[in-house]
Structure formats: structure tokens, C-alpha cells
Image (cartoon, rainbow, N blue to C red):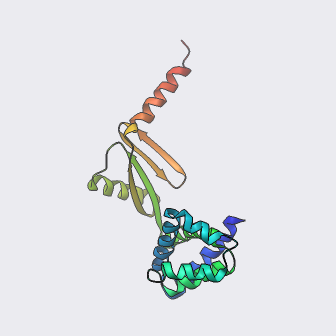
């Protein structure tokens, strides 16, 4: 049910963004609000509390976000408050982000390495992935010293393990399964 609600509202916001030619602006704004709620759990608690009136919530949203987001996004938040869907704001952001990436043919990937990748290696990996997958790649590099060396790629819900640690674990598994 929650996913359905989130998708419906995200799609409505996205379609409005398309009509107004503001999909990127809305993406940035809903993402900003979502990050604020993530960093300030007390604020989210206040927004979803059933004993706080809709008008009080709207005034709170107004005072916090009016200077940072468009009137269209404020109106969207008012609708969410009127319909008592405040608890779904972060999920709406997540699905909106997905819709935006689909529209712009963007695929997000994570490269996990033992040391930070240099710009040249990052660009080369982006080009390779882009050519193989036919998408514009947004690459994030995460450093994890435990992998020793190599790269572990996370693309969508797939993991490609090209790390030294992964290879050593594979060798260990093979050795343990051998009969002597």
C-alpha cells in the first residue's frame, strides 16, 4: 500500500514537472526536503503526528521551506498534508528520482574500491558501462579498505565482484569443497 501511495504522488509530481518543464527543479526540491527529514527525525515525527492539525503542519512547512522550494512544491506538500500522506515524503522522493532517471536515461552505479578512484579511471569505467548498458552512467565511488584491491560494481540490483577479497573467498570456497 505504501509503495502504491508513494508512486501515485511521485508520478503526479513528475507529470506536473514535465508539463511545467521543471522536472529537475522538482527533483532537487523534493530531494532537499527528504534530506532535511532524514537528518531531523523529530521534524518528521511532528509532521506525521495525528494530533497536530493540518494548518499547523502547513505553517511549519511554510516557515521551513518557503525560501528554498517553489510554490508548486509547497502546494504539493499542502496536498500531501491534506490527504495525511506526510509519512510518504521520503518514498515519494525516491520514486520521483527513479522516474527522473528513466526520463533522462540515467543509470546509477557504485564502484567500491580499496582506495579512491582517480578521475581518469572513473571516466574510463563510466564510458565502458555506458557503452555496455546504453545508459548515461552516474558513478559513485565508495572506499572500503577490506576489499584489498580491485573493484566491486553495484549496478541496479546486480553486483559484479572483481575484488581481490572476492577472488580469495572464491578460492577458499573451492579449496574447502575439494576432496583429497
Q: Is residue 136 above or below residue 112?
A: below
> Which residue corresponds to the image point at 67% horizontal and 65% vertical from the top-left?
3
Residue drawn at the location 54% of the way across and 18% of the way down:
178
The residue that appears at 44% across and 80% down in the rendered structure is 68
Residue 56 position in % (x across, y down): 61, 80
Residue 16 spot, x, y in % from top left: 56, 84
Residue at image position (42%, 41%) is 162
In the image as oriented, which residue stretches furthest toward the right? 1
Question: Viewer-proximal residue, 94 or 162?
Answer: 94
Q: Where 170 falls versus 115 (above or below)? A: above
Total numbered labels: 0
**Residue 110: horizontal and vertical position, in percent?**
43, 53
Answer above or below: position of 142 versus 73. above
Q: Residue 71, relative to residue 156: is it above or below?
A: below
Q: What percent of the width, then of the height, locates residue 137? A: 41, 62
Which quadrant: the N terminus? Answer: bottom right
Left or right: where does residue 5 sit relative to residue 124? Answer: right
Amino acid at each position: 500500500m505504501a509503495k502504491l501511495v508513494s508512486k501515485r504522488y511521485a508520478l503526479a509530481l513528475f507529470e506536473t514537472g514535465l508539463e511545467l518543464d521543471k522536472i529537475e527543479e522538482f527533483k532537487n526540491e523534493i530531494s532537499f526536503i527528504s534530506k532535511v527529514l532524514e537528518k531531523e527525525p523529530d521534524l518528521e515525527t511532528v509532521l506525521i503526528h495525528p494530533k497536530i492539525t493540518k494548518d499547523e503542519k502547513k505553517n511549519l512547512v511554510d516557515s521551513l521551506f518557503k525560501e528554498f522550494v517553489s510554490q508548486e512544491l509547497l502546494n504539493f506538500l499542502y496536498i500531501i498534508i491534506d490527504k495525511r500522506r506526510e509519512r510518504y515524503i521520503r518514498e515519494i522522493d525516491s520514486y520521483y528520482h527513479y522516474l527522473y532517471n528513466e526520463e533522462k536515461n540515467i543509470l546509477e552505479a557504485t564502484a567500491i574500491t580499496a582506495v579512491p578512484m582517480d578521475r581518469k579511471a572513473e571516466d574510463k569505467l563510466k564510458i565502458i558501462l555506458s557503452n555496455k548498458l546504453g545508459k548515461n552512467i552516474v558513478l559513485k565511488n565508495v572506499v572500503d579498505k577490506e576489499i584489498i584491491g580491485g573493484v566491486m560494481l553495484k549496478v541496479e540490483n546486480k553486483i559484479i565482484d572483481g575484488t581481490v577479497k572476492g577472488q580469495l573467498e572464491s578460492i577458499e570456497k573451492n579449496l574447502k569443497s575439494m576432496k583429497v
